[in-house]
Each structure stands twice: as structure tokens, then as C-alpha cells.
Amino acid sequence: MKKVTMKDIAREANVSVATVSYILNKVDNQKITDETRCRVLDTAKKLNYIPSLTARSLVKGKSGMLALLFNRSERDGIWKKLYYGMLAERTEALCEQAGYHLLVLGMDAERPSPDIVQQREVDGVLLADVKKEAFRDISIHFNIGVPIVLLDSYIDDPLFHKVVIDYRQAFALWKERSVGRDGRRFLVLDTFTNESMMKAIVDAAQLDPESVFVLTADNADRLPDFLARHQGESGAVLNEFVGVFVANASRGLELELTVFCTSGCPELLPPDVRTLRTEKNQGQLDVAFQIMRFYIESKDKNPEYLRTGTGYGQYVSIPLQ
């Protein structure tokens, strides 16, 4: 099928190609009547016009493309794959609302190589759970001025915002609300590529090493035995997808489970599982996306706008409730 062009729209709507370009690229310094604008947009929709990202980039100085990068490993279980699938879906929804396209790239956790991103101009990058040692090699692939916001990563570089769950607050709230046998508790969590993130979570939990189970594809068959040893206790589980796996493995056991819902889908969990959640529209991804958009849009503003800042520091902690 022949690709629809602006010339086709102009011919059908009986306007100039320049008028079509102004309307479709949202150039607002031209005097165009509402009737003409509606006619052009309706015609574009009727003809199933798909805009060229390259042309948009030349006109607006932006590509309209954002990138989501995350790490993949052979040790990833199905829960990790579902987690990143949901992250990509939620990011795509935010992009659609804001008028962006999304490029999703899963990288080798040990040898990350985002070379493919160099082939596409992107306006901003969300980078999830990256190794501290690999971050510099990844970040230099992007043009100067492209904002990079990190998720689930502790990296001491003040140039980049890191959006993380406030695990100290979350564990304190969990212990306040849970009882368990003789106050004994346990933790089940997925592994993180960012070692500092992993350490921060375990330190915040303040539990004995024997009471912490780091779930991987290699040791998933040992989870039922771990849960059985903690019969009658209160357990915290990080992430809904790990929570579903733990809930299934704990059938028939007397356990008080609380899941830290970091993916925004607590409805996946059985009704007898307790949850800690982020405030609506103020989750980790929501805030990271807000920060990234601020810096993208600041390119069109005066310097004073950028100096006002996002109101966020180097590390942005997201509480659970």
C-alpha cells in the first residue's frame, strides 16, 4: 500500500502542503482557522496518515522518541520478565498520553551494549537497574543534553536523577502493621543488577541473612522449603510478580504476606495478601517520567525556567502506604 504523504492530505483537504505541515507538526505561530485545522486533522485520520519521525525531528528539533533500557540475565525468572513487560507497557501508556513514541531495549546485564540506540535520535532515556560500573559506558552513547533518569539504581553521580522506592520507610511501615510469630519475619525479593540497590534493600530490612531469600531462576525450587521454615511468621515480598509466585508456593502454610507493590498492579495478588502501595500517579515510573519531560520541555524555555528545577534532588525516594 502506498504511504500517505502530506501532499495527499493537502490535495484531499484543499489546502497547501505548508498548511498541513504547520498543523500536523503543531506549529502555533501561524494564523490558521479552527475549521481548516479540523479539516486537515480529519483528513489525516481518514487517510491513516503516519507521521515521519525523521521529518518531525527536523521541524521541531526533537524526535518524539523516548527510550526505555533495562538489563536481562540468564538468571531472570518469569517474574522478572513480567516485571519488565509491565514496565514497558506502563511507559508506553505514559508516552502515548504525552505524544511520544517509545523504543524499548533489553540489554545483557554483564555486557550492556545500547549501540542500536545510537541509530535513533531520542529525546530522553529511562534506564532501569543498571550496574554502577556499566553506567558510564551506557550514558556516553547519548547526545549531550538528552536527559537520562534512572530507576532502581544507586549511582553517585549528581548529574542524574535516581528514582527509588523508600525502602527504609516501607520496611518500617510493614513492621508496624505486621505481627508474625514472636515478632519473627522474613523477606523474599528478586535480584537486582545494581549491587548498591540490593545492599540498600537488605540493609533497610534489618533481618538475619537466614531470613532473606533472593529469588532467581536457579533457586526457585528451593523457595517452598524456605517458606516452610518460616511457618507462622510475617513475610515481606518485593514486587507483585514475585508476590504471585510466593503466594502460590505458600499454599497450605500459615504465613502473613505483605507485598510491596512497585509495578502498580496489586490486583494480581490473592485477596488475603496484604499490600503496600505508592500514591496514585506518584509511583516510581510516574515521577521518573515527569522529571524526564521537564528537561525535554526545558529546551524550548528560557534559562530561568530551567533554573527553577524540577523540585527533585539527586535521589528521589518514593514512599509506600
Image (tube, rainbow, N blue to C red):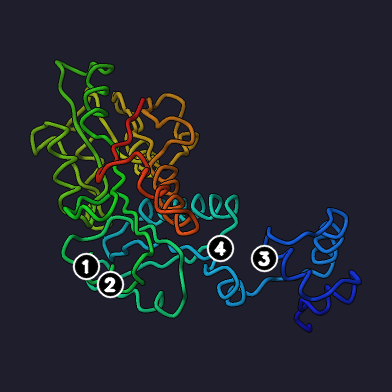
Residue 272 occupies quadrant: top left
Q: CA distance from mark 3 to mark 4?
A: 15 Å
Position of the C terminus by quadrant: top left
What's the residue type where badge 3 is placed? Asn
Q: Residues within 10 Å of mark 2 (few under 14, many from 20)?
A: few
Residue 263: percent from left, percent from top:
42, 42
Residue 201: percent from left, percent from top:
19, 40
Q: Secondary structure at mark 2?
A: loop
Q: Residue 165 or 20: which is nearer the viewer?
A: 20
Q: Secondary structure at mark 4?
A: strand
Q: Residue 61 or 226: which is nearer the viewer?
A: 61
What's the residue type where badge 2 is placed? Ile
Q: Which residue is mark 3?
A: 25
Q: Residues within 10 Å of mark 4 (few under 14, many from 20)?
A: some
Q: Which residue is mark 4?
A: 101
Q: Which residue is mark 2?
A: 140
Please report contact status of discs 1 and 2: CB closer than 8 Å, yes or no: yes
Closer to us: mark 3 or mark 4? 3
What's the residue type where badge 4 is placed? His
